[in-house]
C-alpha cells in the first residue's frame, strides 16, 4: 500500500499530474510524493478523499486545515491522530471522527474527552451501553471492565484513577501502558 510513487524519479514525484494519478488509486501514495506535493492542498484533499489515513503524510500546515481534515476523518476517523492539536480540540471535527469510529476519541484533546456528549457518542459507537444518567467516570469504568484497552481513550484524569486503571489491567494486563 502506498508504493505507487516509491520508485518514481524525483521529477515525477513532484509532477502534479503524476501524483494525482497515483493518489487516485491509493491515497497513501502521498507518502512518496515530493514535499511540495504533500503541502499542496488540492493534492492532499484528493489523497484524503481516497484514504483518510493519507493525512499522515501531509505537510503540517495542511494538517491544520479544517476542510482537509474534515474530509480525512469522515473517511477514516483515526486520521484525527494526524490533525493539528488545535483541530483535535474542535468539537465539529471530533464529532465527525467519532461518528466514523468511536475509537478515534483516543486522538481527541482532553477537553473533548471530558465533553460528556462527545465521550458518550464515542462509547456508544464502540458498542458500549451508555445510560444518560451515568457519569463519565462510571462510563469509562464499565467500559474498561469489558475491554481494558479502552483506557487509551480516557482523559488524563481517568488514566490516573486507581480504580479505573485497576479494572482495565484486570481485564487486559498490557493496558497498564495507557495509565498515567
Image: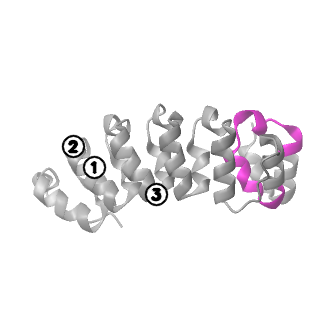
Depth check: 144 or 12 in front?
144
The answer to whether marks 1 and 2 mark residues whose Cβ atoms lie closer than 8 Å is yes
Specify start and end residues of the magenta stretch as a single range. Answer: 145-164
Mark number for residue 40?
2
Q: Is residue 1 above or below residue 86?
A: below
Instruction: Report helix, strand or loop for mark 3.
Output: loop
Q: Which residue is mark 3?
A: 76
Q: Nearer the viewer, residue 107 or 123?
A: 123
Q: CA distance from mark 1 to mark 2?
A: 6 Å
The residue closer to the viewer here, 2 or 147, is 147
C-alpha distance separating marks 3 and 2: 20 Å
Does residue 107 appear left or right of residue 126 in this picture? Answer: left
- Left or right: 21 as drawn, with respect to 26: left
Q: Is residue 22 visible?
A: yes
Q: Residue at x 63, y 44 (%)?
A: 118
Image quarter of residue 133:
top right
Residue at which label 1 appears: 44
43 in relation to 5, above or below: above
Amino acid at each position: 500500500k502506498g508504493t505507487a510513487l516509491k520508485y518514481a524519479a524525483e521529477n515525477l514525484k513532484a509532477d502534479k499530474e503524476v501524483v494525482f494519478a497515483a493518489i487516485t488509486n491509493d491515497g497513501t501514495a502521498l507518502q512518496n510524493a515530493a514535499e511540495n506535493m504533500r503541502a499542496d492542498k488540492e493534492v492532499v484533499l484528493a489523497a484524503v478523499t481516497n484514504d483518510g489515513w493519507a493525512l499522515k503524510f501531509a505537510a503540517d500546515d495542511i494538517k491544520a486545515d479544517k476542510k482537509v481534515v474534515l474530509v480525512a476523518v469522515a473517511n477514516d476517523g483515526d486520521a484525527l491522530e494526524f490533525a493539528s492539536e488545535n483541530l483535535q480540540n474542535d468539537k465539529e471535527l471530533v464529532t465527525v471522527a467519532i461518528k466514523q469510529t468511536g475509537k478515534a476519541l483516543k486522538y481527541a484533546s482532553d477537553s473533548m474527552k471530558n465533553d460528556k456528549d462527545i465521550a458518550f457518542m464515542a462509547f456508544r459507537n464502540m458498542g458500549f451501553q451508555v445510560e444518560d444518567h451515568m457519569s463519565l467516570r462510571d462510563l469509562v469504568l464499565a467500559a474498561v471492565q469489558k475491554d481494558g484497552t479502552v483506557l487509551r481513550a480516557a482523559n488524563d484524569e481517568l488514566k490516573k484513577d486507581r480504580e479505573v486503571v485497576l479494572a482495565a489491567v484486570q481485564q487486559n494486563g498490557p493496558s497498564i501502558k495507557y495509565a498515567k
